[in-house]
Amino acid sequence: MNNFIFQNSTQVYFGKGCVKEYLSCLTRDASTLLLAYGGGSIKKNGVYDEVAGILKEAGKTIVEFSGIMANPTYAKVKEGARLARESNVDMILGIGGGSVMDCCKAVSLAARYEGDIWDDFWARPGVIETEPLTLGVIVTVAGTGSECNGGAVITNEEKKVKTGRDYPKLNPRFALMDPSYTYSVPQRQMVSGSFDILSHIMETYFSEPNEDNVSDDIMEALMRSVIRNLRCAIQNPEDYNARSNLMWDSTMAENRIIKMGKKCDFQCHNMEHQLGAYTDCNHGCGLAVLHPVYYRHIYREGLSKFVRFAQNVWGIARNGKTDEELALAGIDALADFIKEIGLPTSLQELGVSDQAMLKEIADSCAISPGSYKKMTPEEILEILNECF
Ligand code: NZQ
Ligand code: ZN
């Protein structure tokens, strides 16, 4: 196993009723809160009323920051930072999924930072001395695991770049996670969010080291859990146990634990982020199109791990198959699962109509040093064309 340092500073409050039980205590130091959310789902499902009621009863001043879009933009981050500064906010409370949480993390830093946060943070990774504003989150959809990491994936529309990195200072101080809040997530979003969880695990699993290590064992259990519980939640969207497992699978995939001792790949994420920057596609749906094609390009270089994946995740018996046949059977099982849960299998199905744009996307993709097979812009273009 490779050397590592582990820390995660987010406090998690998990389970039915956790907001009612803990929110007032967790916000006791704040007098003015930036209440941040997306396009309004929380007003329809009652979460907004519940949260606002608790804050008002505690005598807090609420400053609303709404309309955070899927794939949040740098312009939206600047809007939130301005609002937080002008209103002397002393805590941000984000309610939503990855887009809201990521935007809030970015606002928490931008509100305190004097310079241009894009040029000095996203475009030039390094340490920033500024202490971000305190952030707490209430998670309403499982998928990104953003609640327990320092990642803030932001799209700079002008520069056509979507990027993020795990910066520990941006970990939320607390995360409230009530699985019953996810009952109202539309099936398409639940499925794409669940595929994002699976993708985070696969992007970590398919990387060195390949020898026996506890992270790979945990990941196999997590992948089986996502597959099993997603099937249950599709059958019954109000299956509390399935929603709980998916919500915690999502956190476990991105709270750094499974990355310990692993090199990590994330080449599919690099490709999807640029696809998102050019087309604004749904993150989980973009990943679903890319994964099987990418894996058919790299499985030979990571053969032993692809054999394990087929056997331990999909339960495929050897029955005389060679290693190569088993590895390919595991990738086929993944592709079949993507079809079964109704996710797109081609870029055209995803809504991409301009094949000529793919070269620009390929040329602007970051190349992962952790891939079993180091990509080139030419091979990324080949993959994108095969996905088309
Ligand atoms: O905006 P509202 O009206 O709230 O609706 C949202 C949105 O339309 C809806 N939704 C959320 N909770 C709901 C609900 N609808 C009904 N009931 C509820 N309880 O779901 C839609 C999607 O929300 P969004 O936050 O965009 O989805 P997701 O959690 O998948 O986040 C995607 C963003 O996170 C980034 C992605 O790139 C993308 O920008 N990522 C962040 C990561 C991180 N910070 O660690 C890692 C990921 O790999 C990813 O890159
Ligand atoms: Zn993701």
Image (cartoon, grey):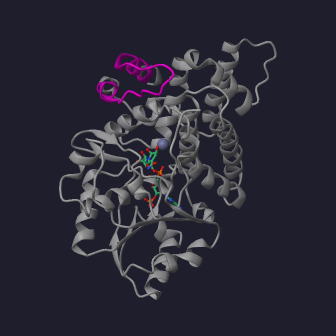
Residue 198, placed above or below residue 27: above
In the displayed image of the protein, which residue is found farthest to the right? 319
- Residue at far left of view: 115
User: Is 11 rendered above or below residue 31?
Assistant: above
Q: Does the magenta stretch include residue 26?
A: no
Q: Residue at x 40, y 22 (%)?
A: 380
Q: In which quarter of the image is residue 16?
A: bottom right
Residue in the foreground of this view, choosing between 108 and 262: 262
Identify the residue at horizontal 46%, vertical 31% (top origin). Answer: 268
Residue drawn at 39 percent across, 38 percent down: 273
238 relative position to 281: left or right: right
Q: Nearer the viewer, residue 45 or 15?
A: 15
Quarter of the image where the N terminus is located? top right
Return the x and y of residue 122 as percentages of the image width and height: 29, 45
Instruction: Give residue 70's position: percent from left, percent from top.
Output: 40, 52
Name the quarter where the C terminus is drawn: top left
- The stretch in magenta equals 360-384
Residue 332: x %, y % from top left = 64, 24
Does 24 sit left or right of 151 as displayed?
Answer: right
- Residue visible at 51% across and 55% down? 8
Task: Specify whether 109 is left or right of 138.
Answer: left
Q: In front: 244, or 85?
A: 85
| Front position in the image: 72 or 131 | 131
Q: How many labels does the image show?
A: 0
Question: Is residue 223 rendered to the left or right of residue 90?
Answer: right
Q: Is residue 107 above or below residue 250?
A: below
Q: Is residue 366 magenta?
A: yes
List x then y, in percent, for residue 9: 49, 59
